[in-house]
Image (spheres, rainbow, N blue to C red):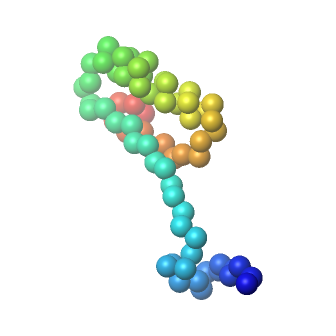
Amino acid sequence: MAAREENENTCILERKPIFIFVIHFHQPVGQLGEVLERLFENSYKPLMNTLMKYRAPVALHFSGPLL
């Protein structure tokens, strides 16, 4: 049996599922500089290095003082 082709007329329930991995980074305005530094070194930096190492497809969203 031939695979069914997908096009814009294909019902959403018949389409191949798509997963988008999104990571949201946020700290409140006024967060202490030493806290931001510790978070960066212990959380954000190791995570980003791992994502880059494995070339993981991911969407990143930054807000607040992290911009």
Residue lying furthest right: 2
**Residue in the picture at 74% in, 82% down:** 2
Q: How many numbered callouts?
A: 0
- Residue 8 is left or right of residue 59, and the answer is right
Foreground residue among 59 and 46? 46
- Residue 40 is left or right of residue 55, and the answer is left
**Residue in the picture at 49% in, 79% down:** 13
Residue lying furthest top: 34
Looking at the picture, how far across and down is residue 31, in whole percent? 26, 24
Quarter of the picture holding the N terminus: bottom right
Quarter of the picture holding the C terminus: top left
**Residue in the picture at 64% in, 38% down:** 55
**Residue in the picture at 49% in, 24% down:** 45
User: Quarter-wise, where is residue 16 in the image?
Assistant: bottom right
Is residue 67 placed above or below 7 in the rendered structure? above
Foreground residue among 11 and 32? 11
Foreground residue among 55 and 65? 55
Residue 33 visible in this rendered orientation of the protein: no
Looking at the picture, how far across and down is residue 5, in whole percent? 69, 80
Residue 38 visible in this rendered orientation of the protein: yes
Looking at the picture, how far across and down is residue 37, in whole percent? 38, 17
